Image (spheres, coloured by chain):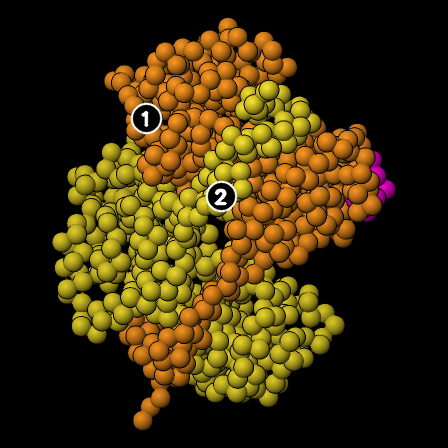
Chain colours: A orange, B yellow
Amino acid sequence: MVTLTRLDSAQPDFQARLARLLQFDDAADAAIEQTVAAILHDVKKRGDAAVLEYTERFDRLPAASLASLEINAAQLQAALEHLPADTRQALEAAAERVRRYHEKQTLASWTYTEDDGTVLGQKITPLDRVGLYVPGGKAAYPSSVLMNAIPAKVAGVGELIMVVPTPGGDQNQLVLAAAAIAGVDRVFTIGGAQAVAALAYGTATVPQVDKIVGPGNAYVAAAKRRVFGTVGIDMIAGPSEILVIADGNTPPEWVAMDLFSQAEHDEMAQSILLSPDAAYLDAVAAAIDKLIDEMPRSEVIRTSLTNRGALIKTRDLDDAVAISNTIAPEHLELSVTDPDALLPGLRHAGAIFMGKHTCEALGDYCAGPNHVLPTSRTARFSSPLGVYDFQKRSSLINVSQAGAQTLGQIAATLAYGEGLQAHARSAEYRLVHK
Amino acid sequence: MVTLTRLDSAQPDFQARLARLLQFDDAADAAIEQTVAAILHDVKKRGDAAVLEYTERFDRLPAASLASLEINAAQLQAALEHLPADTRQALEAAAERVRRYHEKQTLASWTYTEDDGTVLGQKITPLDRVGLYVPGGKAAYPSSVLMNAIPAKVAGVGELIMVVPTPGGDQNQLVLAAAAIAGVDRVFTIGGAQAVAALAYGTATVPQVDKIVGPGNAYVAAAKRRVFGTVGIDMIAGPSEILVIADGNTPPEWVAMDLFSQAEHDEMAQSILLSPDAAYLDAVAAAIDKLIDEMPRSEVIRTSLTNRGALIKTRDLDDAVAISNTIAPEHLELSVTDPDALLPGLRHAGAIFMGKHTCEALGDYCAGPNHVLPTSRTARFSSPLGVYDFQKRSSLINVSQAGAQTLGQIAATLAYGEGLQAHARSAEYRLVHK
C-alpha cells in the first residue's frame, strides 16, 4: 500500500499545506561548492593534464592523452549500426519528429525602413560552438541526447561537442548511437566538473564552447553555475514533476501509471493529481495500490509518492487550473474530455499534455516538443529548451542623415539631462548645421 | 594628452596582446557575497521590518512603514508634469520609438495539426509580475527605465514593480517621470540587496515577482545572482564597451567623440577603434587630444581610454570583422561607407550601429532597439533585452487516439531501452488492443 498525502482545496489551511508539499531543499552544499571551485581553477590553469588526472581519479579511466578519450565518427556510426533494428527505428523516428517540431522554432532576421530612410532590425546568428553534457551511468538517456542536440543543430550551431563520462571505460552504446543520429560533431568521454571546465575554458584538446547544456549531478550543476557568464548555460534542473488534472473520464490505471512514470525517475520526483471527483481520487489510489508491486522500480516510486506525491480534491476544474498556476508544473497533463476549454486559463507550465491519450511519456520521447523543461516553479518565467536557446539576436540600427537630425536632437536633450555630455556631443556632430 | 594602447593585427603576438586588453577582473568579492547572503536571509525571514531597517541604515531614510515608501501614481504623474517641455517631449518621443521597435519582437502562439489529428504547438504567456531595479544617485538614468520597462509592458506583463533607492530621501524626478511614461505600475523607494530580496521573496507590502531586471551596483548584482532560480533575472552586466570599425571616411572628431561617449560611463568602460588606415588612427588620436579637455567628464574618459582603450591597425576591413567577432562587443559601430557589406561576416555583437550617421548615442536613447546589451563577450551567446525576456513558452501536445498508436510504440521501445518501465506501460495503456 502506498500512503499518499490527501488534500482538499476547500480546507481553510490548504494554501499552507500546498506550500509545504511543494517545498524541497535545494540549498547549495558547501563541500561540493569548494571541490568544484578547485577543479575549475585547476583545469583552467593546467588544461588537459588536470582533466586526465580527474578522469583517472573519478572515473577510474587512465589515459595517455585527452585525444585518446575522443570517440570518433566511425565509432559513433558503429554504435548506431549495432543497435537492434526496432531500437534504431524508434530512435530515428523520434529524432525525425523532434527535428520537425523544432524547425518551427527557428528565428528569422528582420528589418524595417522608416519614412526618413532609417533602417532598424534584428539579426539572428546561431551560436558558434556548444557543449552538451550527458550523464554517465544509470541516468544516461539517449532521448536526452536527441532533445539537447537536435535543437542546437536545427539552430545552425557550427560545432556541437558532447562530453559523457564512461566510468571504468564502460560506454553506453545507446547514447553514442543517439549522438550519431543527432549529428553531434565530437564526443569526449570525460565528465564531472572537469568536463564542464574543459568546455568553458578550453584546453589544448577540447575547444572552448560558447554555451553548455544538458543535465548532470550536483557537481556538474555547481560547475555550470560557476562558469555562467564565461559561457551561457541552460537552466539548472530540479527534481522532475508531473501535475495531472483529471475530470474522472480517464481509466484510473492510466493516470496511476502516469503518476508512476514521473515517480520512477527518483525519490525526489513529484507526482500530483487534481480532480473535483472524490470517488475518482479513491479509484486512482486503489489503482496505485494494485499496480505498484508490478513495477521494477517500485521502491523508488513508493518513496517518491509517499514523500512528495499528493491527491488533491478541487472544487471544480477551474479551481484545479488556479492551483496548477500556483504550482507552475514542469509537466501538466489535462486528462479531461475537453482540454481546450482549460487552455486559456493556464498561465504557467513547461509542457501541456492534452487529452487522455496524451500521456507524458509520449512527449518525453517522441511527440516532438522538447523534454528539457523548467522545473521547481520556474515555468513562471522560463521556457522549454528550444532552437531559440542556440540562436541570439543583434540589434541593427542604420540611421539615415535625415533620421540623424530628428534622433540627434532627442538624444542630445536626454544625454544632457543625464549629465553625459560626450553622448550629447556625439549626437550633435551628426546634425547638419546651416 | 591621452596615451592609448596602439596595436597592429600584423604583430606576431597580436592575439595575446588583444586577450590582455580585453581581460578584466570580475572576481566575486567574498565580503560583498557574505553581506548580501545575510541581507537576503534576513529579508526572507523578517520581511518589511528588515527592509525598513536596511533602508534606514544604508539610505539614511527612516520610515514608519514600507507602505509609506511607496510612490503613488499621482506623484509619478506630477513628476512628469513638472518636467521642462523639451525634456518631456524628448522622453515621450524616445518611449514611442522604443515601443514601436519592441512591438515587432512580440512572440505569437502557434499550433499545427498532423495527418492523424495530433496537434502540436507552443503557447506564449507573458510573465505575471516583474521587478525593475533602478539605481539611485549619479547612475540613475531615465533612459534605463524606458529600456527596461517598455519591453515588459509590450510583452503584456501583468504588473511591473519598480524599486529605486532614494538616499536621504532625494528623489530623481526624471526617473519618476520616465516610470510614468513607461507605465510602471508601482514604485517603492528601496534599493540594494534588501530591495532585490523583497521582490524575490515578497514581503507583507512588496509583492513577490517572477523576474527581476535592471542594473545595479556590486551588491545588487550579487543579490540577483543569488535569487536566480527563485525568480528569473536578466544578465549581470559588466563594464560597457564600444568597438568602432572605421574605413577612414568619418570625420576623426566624430569617432573620437563616439569613443568618449563610452569612456565617460566609468573608468572600466572600454573603447576600441579598428581601422586599416594608419593615418586615420593618428587623426583620431589627434582629435582625442584636441577634444578631451572640453569634456566635463574628462578625468573618467582619460582613465578609461588610457587603461582600457586601444587603437588597432588591421590588415583590411575583413580583418577588422574577424577581430570584432573575437571581441564580441556590446556596441559595434560600422563607421564605414558600405556597412551592409560587412554585415554577413559579423557573428557576435549586442547592437550594430551602421554608417557614420549612426553613433551609439542615438541607440542609447531613442533609435528604438534596446540599450540593455550583452557585455564582456557574452554576445557570443546572448541577446539584447527584449520582449522575449518577458514572455515564455509552454509546449502543447494533443495526441489523437490514432497518433497514440504510432507514438506509443516508439515511446515504449525507447522507455524499455532506458529501463523506465512505468513510462513504457503508460504509453502502452493508450494502445488499442485488438
- The amino acid type of the residue labelled 1 equals Leu
Q: Is A67 one of the magenta-colored residues?
A: yes
**Neighbours of disc 2 within 10 Å: few (<14), some (14-19), many (20+):** few
- Residue annotated with mark 2: B113
Image point 35% across, 88% down: which residue? A432
Mark 1 or 2: the one toward you:
2
Chain letter for the residue marked with disc 1 in the picture: A
Locate the C terminus of chain A by quadrant: bottom left
User: Decide: marks 1, 2 in contact (CB < 8 A)?
Assistant: no
Q: In the rendered structure, which segment of residues is drawn in magenta?
A: A62-70
Q: Position of residue B396 (x, y in %)?
A: 46, 39
Which residue corresponds to the image point at 64% horizontal and 67% vertical from the top-left? B18
| Relative height, residue A243 to residue A119 (above, below) | above
Q: Which residue is mark 1?
A: A317
Q: Is residue B270 above or below residue B419?
A: below
Name the secondary structure under disc 2: strand
Q: Is residue A36 visible?
A: no
Left or right: A26 in relation to A344: right
Q: Amino acid at mark 2?
A: Thr
The one of B3 and B160 positioned closer to us in this rendering: B160
User: Can you give x and y, in whole percent of width and height, for residue B373 in the image?
Assistant: 46, 60
